[in-house]
Amino acid sequence: MRASKIAAAILGAVVICGAGDFAYPGEKQATAKFDLGKREYDSKCAVCHGSTGVGDGPYAELLNTKIADLTTLSQRNHGMFPVLWVQEVIDGRQSFKAHGPREMPIWGLDYLAKAGEANLDFPYEAEAYVRSRILALTEYLYRLQAK
């Protein structure tokens, strides 16, 4: 019993101290920071909106509608980035009849399904998972805004 407590303490200390930053002698340390917003954008949005957000992704020519230029959201909103609107559009679980038909995927449902898959072995708050992904993506779109 005592040995398992010591092992748990050592494991906890390793996790807290950042064992993920460990490199073997002679290996170069990875210096790239993890960017959840960019990862989400690249995996979900870039196919239509393009890698720079201007609407020139590889699927853009296959669609019947013009793809939005995401780099001008602030310009089109009198210089203010429309955070809540962007989050609602990405989420897509609420219907916006005044905005016409929705052709963009409903990412809120996709994230909700992934929350269940990712957290099968421990309790979780699925909506927190959805909100964190959408918030990271919204923050990345803010960084794409034209100056």
Image (tube, grey):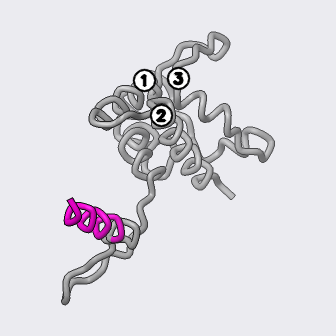
Query: Which residues are drawn in magenta?
Result: 1-13
Q: Residue at x 31, y 71 (%)?
A: 19
| Residue farthest to the front, as pictured | 1
Instruction: Determine whether 3 is above or below 115 in the image.
Output: below
* Crowd around label 3: few <14 · some 14–19 · many ≥20 (10 Å): some
- Against 96, residue 137 (above or below) is below
Q: Residue furthest top?
A: 97
SS of the residue at dot 3?
loop
Say which label, 2 or 3, has the lower sequence index.
Answer: 3
Please tell me which residue is depicted at 51% across the width and 36% down the height of the picture.
128
- Residue 109, position in %: x, y? 42, 23
According to the picture, the residue beneath numbered tag 1 turns out to be 109
Asked if disc 2 and disc 1 are in contact, CB closer than 8 Å, the reply is: no
Instruction: Please name the residue that numbered disc 2 is placed on.
Output: 130
Q: Name the residue beneath numbered marker 3.
A: 92
Identify which residue, 78 or 16, lies in the foreground: 16
Where is residue 132 drawn, in percent x and y?
51, 42
Question: On the image, which quarter does residue 46 sit in?
Answer: top left
User: Quadrant of the image for the C terminus?
Assistant: bottom right
Residue 2 forms part of the magenta stretch: yes
